[in-house]
Amino acid sequence: MPARLRDAAAQALIGAVASSTSVLPAPAGEVRALALGLVVTTAIAVVGALVLSPYPSAEVWGRLTPGDCAEYCEASAHCGALARRAVIQQPANSWSNLAFVLVGFVALFRRLTPRSVTFALACCVLGIGSFLFHATVTRELQWLDVVGMYVALGAVAARGLHDAWGLRWSRVLPAYLGWSSLLTIFKWQLDTTIAMVALGFVVAWAMARRMRAGAGSLAAALLPLGLIGIGYGVRALDVSRAWCDPASWLQGHALWHLLSAASLYTAWRFFDASGKASA
């Protein structure tokens, strides 16, 4: 992709994320929550870098089942022996997953509740799992990557059930853990797209119910959908190689991670802004 188009894509990402601050007004304490989230996320990144720094190559992952090194653009030109690959094989695609960790902790520090704890833990599973998958490019960690997507979006869906239908969290949480366990166990037998669309439908339905009750705005409800739509399009460009520079720091799949994290957070913030139905 020409440099002009890459720059335009980056500017579009910045504008899309920045627009969330006007659509979803920031309550008191949001800056503090962001600052704390950045501190914790940075600490996790430093620990991860220190743990992996002694290893000179991807040979450390040799006992795991190899994945498809050329599935995504980044580093696809270097799919030879593990000894010739870096220990973090896809750096941009790996480190960009810290965005999931960040939004989970920001939600947690904004408002400490059993629901935000669940969301933060789910985002950490997704962020760390996807980081490890793109670092190792192995089947075992690919499983964890997809499981993370299920539990993170599932946490938002569970929040929607709580808020829109007035179900107590003490009843919603076991259901969430149950369907997350089933999705985890049968990951390889399920179509990931269908499962994610089903969870997304629950979130959208819950948003619609909240808006019919006079809580939340249409713009705030559409923002997560717009972000994930743009992100999926960028991901498709990466996979199809329509946008591909294996050595560039700006990767389509990394942008997909950033936009997906923004989508998760703005969906969560929709329910914060629209209020809660019960304890």
Image: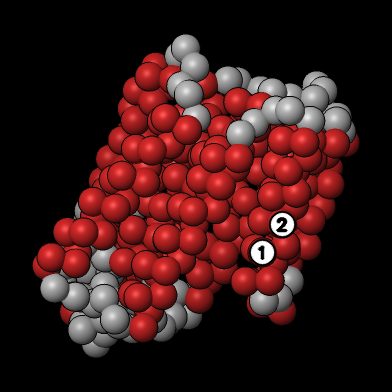
List x then y, in percent, for residue 164. 79, 36
Q: Are marks 1 and 2 in contact (CB under 8 Å)?
A: yes
Give above or below for 157 relative to 93. above
Residue 155 in the image, given as x and y percentages of width and height: 67, 44
Q: Which residue is mark 2?
A: 201
The label on residue 179 is none
The residue shown at (33%, 60%) is 254
Q: Residues within 10 Å of mark 1 (few under 14, many from 20)?
A: few
Secondary element at tag 1:
helix
The alpha-carbon separation of the residues under discs 1 and 2 comes to 6 Å
> Which of 262 and 92 lies nearest the eye of the viewer?
262
Q: Residues within 10 Å of mark 2 (few under 14, many from 20)?
A: few
Q: Quadrant of residue 81?
A: bottom left
Please name the amino acid that badge 2 sits on.
Answer: Phe
Left or right of 99 in this view: 184: right
Name the foreground residue: 176 vs 27: 27
Q: From the image, tell me which residue sits under label 1.
A: 197
Asked whether, in this view, residue 132 is left or right of residue 221, the answer is: left
Residues 149 and 65: in front is 149
Amino acid tagged 1: Val
Vertically, is 255 above or below 155?
Answer: below
Residue 142 spot, x, y in % from top left: 51, 70
The structure residue drawn at horizontal position 13% and vertical position 65%, both measured from the top left corner, is: 4
Could one spot residue 1 in this view of the protein?
yes
Q: Secondary structure at mark 2?
A: helix
